[in-house]
Amino acid sequence: MGPPGSRGSTSARGSLQHLTFFLLFMGPFNCFASYSRATELFYSLNEGLPAGVLIGSLAHDLRLPTADGQRPPALQPPLSFTLASRGLGGQYVQLDNRSGELHTSALEIDREALCVESSGATIIGGAAAASSSSSPSPESCLLLLDVLVLPQEYFRLVKVKIAIRDVNDNAPHFPVPHIRLSVPENAPVNTRLAIEHPALDPDMGTNGVQTYRLGDNYGVFTLDVEENESGERTPYLIVMGALDREAREEYVTVIIAEDGGTPPLVGSATLTIDISDINDNCPQFNDSQVNVTLYGNSTLGTHVATVHAIDMDLGSNAQITYSYSQKVPQPSRDLFHLDESTGVITLSSMVDGDSPRLHRLIILGNGPGCIPAVITVLVNIIKVMMRPPEVVPRFIANEVEGVVYLKELEPINTPIAFFTIKDPDEKYKVNCYLDGDGPFRLSPYKPYNNEYLLETTKPLDYETQQLYEISVVAWNSEGFHVNKIIKVQVLDDNDNSPVFSQQLIELSIEENNVPNAFLTKLHATDADSGERGEVSYFLGPDAPSYFSLDKITGVLTVSTQLDREEKEKYRYTVKAVDSGFPSRESIATIAITVLDKNDNSPRFINKDFSFFVPENFPGFGEIGVISVTDADTGQNGWVALSVVNGSDIFVIDTGKGVLRAKVSLDREQQSSYVLWIEAVDGGDPALSSTAKITILLLDINDNPPLVLFPQSNMSYLLVLPSTLPGSPITEVYAVDKDTGMNAVIAYSIIGRRGPRPESFRIDPKTGNITLEESLMQNDYGLYRLLVKVSDHGYPEPLHSTVMVNLFVNDTVSNESYIESLLRKEPDINIEEKQPQISIEPTHKKIESASCMPTLVALSIISLGSITLVTGMGIYICLRKGKKRHRTEENLEVQIPLNGRISLHMLEKKPVEISNI
């Protein structure tokens, strides 16, 4: 037997093995149970919430192990929450995959836009699953989500229902702004009339429309609301008092709808209540009797009287007809005619001696469904023994029912009518005259008696007066008068042209206008009437095609964008034409000025400017002019220039564009400058452009050659006597900071001292010093060569000098002695030779080439002498070439200079150098 500890350990291991087998056996069944579980969660939230609002925590509400701490965290695999599908409902929520928290997304929920109301709940995002939990109300708007919970150990499908609660975010509104309702005037009290356009409110429940009220009920109306089975509320107008259309035919008020939210929201519309007429009024005469006197000699058609009844009703209810009562005898009916529509009584037959002197005319005013109104007209006929004169017209002009029609363009003395004036009894003399204003004349027509002609005295003008009323009056010697009224209607003719209110119409419009921009509305008047006065508008032939003129309204527009830089002024004609025949027209001028807008940036003449400036150019000197333009005008075309970079060295004149440097420029410090110049106009907002400026400094000969070797006038070199002639001894090396010809260096020996100083020579190009002759025993000693180093600068070459010391000996046995000799001021006779210029001769080719145009010109002038001319040309070219060749071969000129010089302060003199 082992130790007790061993036995316990064995027992523990056995228990662990049994637990492992149990878990392996139960694991599949556990997973199967997890797959079979489905859970439903229900949440609710208000519509219109911002993003990030917590809806609920699935892990907490499902009481998963991570939420309630049933197992240690080390044994819990991480949970994962995932939407099974992102349908419409998934757009409005954000699910945290780790914590299971559900939040609102950035897409705001609008319940009224999402939910379609039906008899049951409205589902957004899928079909509702069956659940034993309490179902939402029929008014609910649901978002349905399917959430998968993983891993497999905790797998389940969670049905999440989110009910969207309504908030009062919509005010009631009527579908039409003006509601009209008709109520008969005999409507009894408590009559109910439905208002056909009730207010609408997308909100639900108490947030929807609850009540209606009137802004002003006038003491005779009120409102009531009825709700049907589906919950719709309809307002009813209730009559609370008696109505009388004849007292007031219309009531205008405001109907107000109010919802039940907190605070309540309202909407309104105008309500017009029309009181419709009923036949509740009968005709009435203002008087019961009218007395009329009529002369027995009155002519047919003489107006006797007019009766008029009034009915307060409208339309057909107020139609009145007039008739004689049955009590009126037939002779009176035959003598007097009654117009049944107008109530006018006229004399219809001549009064004779047997006619009664008094006539009682009983007239009835008849209305629909009414007892007739009655009025009595008493006509008293006065018997006259003498008959009045007679006036018999015979019209020449067009006459209809006593109205004569004349055109306004008829000439003077246009005849209108003949009038025959006579006495029926042929006992009395009858005279006549014309009564009334107007250009008319009534004159006897010779040679007939009692005949008169009515004619015009001047042209008629329709625009001055259209109707004249004149009377032809005849009277006899007994004083009886008779009037014959004549109406003259002037007919309009097309005698007036349209007239513009302005002959010159000046307009302005900003450029870059929108297409079809309005310019103006033309207005022309025509004094003629009818279609002769109707004016149409047309563009003249000189108008550009992109201008349009409405024929009827006269509205002038431009169909395209105008560009002031392309064209600033437009001037063309327009016509106003009437509709007469033939038509008449007038012309006006349109002058349009296109106003500038800042639509053009400043423009440099070149994008890149290059200026060549000699170095050491004085400060604030003019380097160059920057030219810039701007197509705009005025302030928009004003351009300011500035240096974007390098402003500490360079400045620019804004007005003139002159570029200057503040300081003198040194090419040796910087050979070129690149600047950027900005041009900004004066528009608002301002436009700008830039240009590149390159400034190249031209070299001038302002630096003498700098001798780098030998470094000192006190240095020396040992030359062995055995040195062979032609061997290089040493060299003089110099540089020049200038460029080009200013940096081309020539070397020459201008002073010598020694036993045989001519034994050494210097190469003018390289500065190499060589031995010319073999050295003898007598040639031992110190040689001092004064070397001049000169450039080829223009206009004045610059030079430097250096002393080259050569000690001819086998050895240097006493250096102090040599140094003492070097310290002594040398006595050197200067024999300066002009240095040979090391430039390859290229002039032969140039000169030869320059002869070719001469040869061609001479050949054209004289074809017959081509051989002679060619020979002369070749001869001239050869002569020039030989002369140039001789000059180049003899570049080294010896100029003897006698006297002593100071090696430390050697005068710099210009050396004339040819072929540069």
Image (cartoon, rainbow, N blue to C red):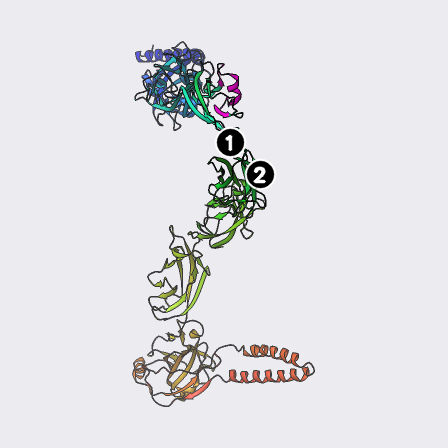
Left or right of 877 in this view: 890: left
Q: Residue 351, relative to residue 793: is it above or below?
A: above
- Tell which of 357 and 443 is nearer to you: 357
Residue furthest to the right? 864
- The location of residue 318, given as percent across then percent down, is 45, 20
- Residue that badge 1 annotates: 387
Q: Which mark is residue 395?
A: 2
Q: Is residue 326 magenta?
A: yes
Left or right of 433 in this view: 42: left
Q: Secondary structure at mark 2?
A: strand
Residue at 38% x, 64% y is 656
Residue furthest to the bottom? 898
Residue interval drawn in magenta: 323-346
One can see residue 901 in this view: yes
- The location of residue 105, given as percent across then percent down, is 38, 27
How many other residues sit within 10 Å of disc 2, few (<14), some (14-19) or many (≥20)? some
- Tell which of 5 and 830 is nearer to you: 830
Q: Is residue 819 magenta?
A: no
Q: Secondary structure at mark 1?
A: loop
Q: Residue 689, relative to residue 66: is it above or below?
A: below
The answer to whether mark 1 and mark 2 are in CB contact below 8 A is: no
Residue at 40% x, 76% y is 732
> Could you tell me the amino acid type at mark 1?
Arg
- Tell which of 239 and 889 is nearer to you: 239
One can see residue 146 in this view: no
Instruction: Please tell me whether mark 1 or mark 2 is closer to you in this view.
Output: 1
- Tell which of 226 and 187 is nearer to you: 187
- The location of residue 86, given as percent across then percent down, is 45, 24
Mark 1 vs mark 2, CA separation in Å: 25 Å
Q: Earlier in the sequence, mark 1 or mark 2?
A: 1
Left or right of 842 in this view: 4: left
